[in-house]
Amino acid sequence: MRIVGLNSGLDSLMKPISGGSVACVCDGKIEFAMAEDRASRKKYDGGYAHSLRMMYDYLEIGVKDVDFFVISFYGHPLIPRKDILAHHLKDLGLEKIPEKLVVIPSHHLSHAYAAYFLSPFEESLIMIADNEGSLLFSKDAEQKGTHSNYCERNSYYWARGNEIVLIGRDFETPGNAGFGKVYNKFTRYIGFGNYHNAGKTMGLSSYGRFPESWRSVDLWAMDAEGSLQSTLRDTWSTVPDMENFLKNNKMEFSLSQAPDRYLEQAGKDLAQYVQGQLNKWSLRKVGHLLEKTGVKNVCIAGGVGLNGVMNTYIEQKTGQSVFVPPFPSDQGQALGNAIWGSHYLEGVAHRPQLPKRGSSDYVYLGTDYTNEEILSCCEALTGLGIRFSLEKDICETAARLLSENKVLGWFQGRSEYGARALGNRSMLASPHSAQLRDRVNTLKRRELFRPLAPSVLSDRAKEYFNTEESLLDPLMLGVVQAKENRRKKIEGVVHVDNSSRVQCVSSFQNPKYHRLLTAFYELTGIPLVINTSFNKAGEPIVETPEDAVRAAASMNLDALVCNDVLIRFSDKVEANTKGINKQKQYQ
């Protein structure tokens, strides 16, 4: 049975929203998954129009080959309106076979399925935390925003075997602000714009040194039953909400309205404060539920799951294993939907006597290309002034270039599903200097205060980082301290607080990337490289060879490696790209 998961790109007012994706599960095996922006080339794009066509092409299937489409919604009642469903039936070509379209019971349940059924656990507590999910009641859904409705904001589940059950929610009443909403209000207030930039706030938090008086001020409170309430009220207007909270709690500081006000000390202090509060109260809640349920493992999803500092804090303080899927935000909804469909529609759900049906292959789920296809692409793009060659040992060649302080684009195999580049659509550099780190950030048009992550050989990680084996490390979703005697040697991947968001790479997880790291280690004695996503700021991560060539050219990278093809650029590549029309295969 083939199940396709989709994440709708429309809210209850039929207005576009971000975070679209598509995924396919066939007979319990994940065949494909992709965020919409990878295909449409529009950052954070919503819906599924382009990614669905790319999936059909890649798998060589069509509507007739799909048994069910399972769709999720954001900001809709748990049972969507008939006109919303009719729109999607028409959009998918299912008007004559409406029984093929199935709605997952809730937004947060989709996140829960993606988290638990990809984890190695047979039993787990699950925390879902984001801005909002589904509206819990349909009354006034079209007239009022999510802040004025009863919503999923923080949800908690207990999973065992093939079953997941809801055990509680926090912040569901109107005006209550959960972990995601509060963190994003701080993100906007200190000058980073919308919630997509919450990761910048996490990085900036390490520079803060807020007053001691702030430590007694809490953003959330817990009652005797363990339920959380927010002390910052949500009226959908960030500045008044923030100013009321800060004034009422006598949190005095000086923050201008300049676009880069986040670089002022007050901006750094606010970032550190909200990160500390998220750590404190997520731990308090998870700890309460672990004690109450007696469960031994934790899964986390929803956009807050991208906060690696919080994830590691919970793991270290509880002593429990923590798993976060590489796509915890809404772009992971499609796979959660497809997994839910494969359980319910194939009769696996609620059958605890059966072994848990999970999946270990859940990272590299996008498209891949042959050397011949890449060479053909290069031939078509010779107007960019590129030189290219098929290398006998591309890992040795790339390792040598990295050892010479070159910045490379690294394009291999199937693309990653998720926000983290995990060695198939990456930009790489040597980790030995802060100057090289700054050059990478500059090429990407990123703020220089932002840290860059290391990819490290898994069997060498403990030589450089204070880390125990963690499920967070292979997915770059946790943060550990760099060892004091190694920091100077790898200062390009050590943040101001001496932390690093590591990716431990094994030959099992990614054989070719492991070979590259091994070759670099043999040349330099350093078993790790800088790894950041292969994209310029404001653009999605590259998906196709053409995307990779154009992105590398526009950023003036020193070289690009696509499979076994080495591509070099002339000095005037960026100027040349302006006069060439981009082919839009999936637009």
Image: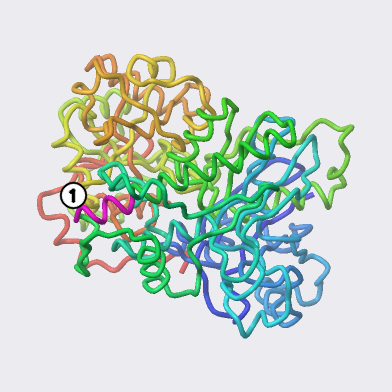
User: Is 303 on the left or on the right of 238, as rendered?
Assistant: right
Residue drawn at point x = 50 percent, y = 56 percent: 180
- Tell me which corner region of the image, top left, top right, bottom left or bottom right, holds residue 286: top right
Image coords of residue 16 (percent x, y): 52, 75
Q: Amino acid at mark 1?
A: Thr
Please state which of residues 179 and 376 is positioned toward the viewer in this rendering: 179
Please state which of residues 539 and 390 is positioned toward the viewer in this rendering: 539
Q: Callout 1: helix, strand or loop?
A: helix
Residue drawn at point x = 51 percent, y = 50 percent: 304
Q: Work out whether 438 lies above or below 232.
A: above
Q: Disc 1 designates what residue?
A: 442
User: Is 289 on the left or on the right of 519, as rendered?
Assistant: right
Q: Is residue 268 magenta-colored?
A: yes
- Tell me which corner region of the image, top left, top right, bottom left or bottom right, holds residue 334: bottom right
Question: Taking the image as drawn, is residue 306 in sight?
Answer: yes
- In magenta, the rendered stretch is 264-271
Please state which of residues 170 and 19 is positioned toward the viewer in this rendering: 170
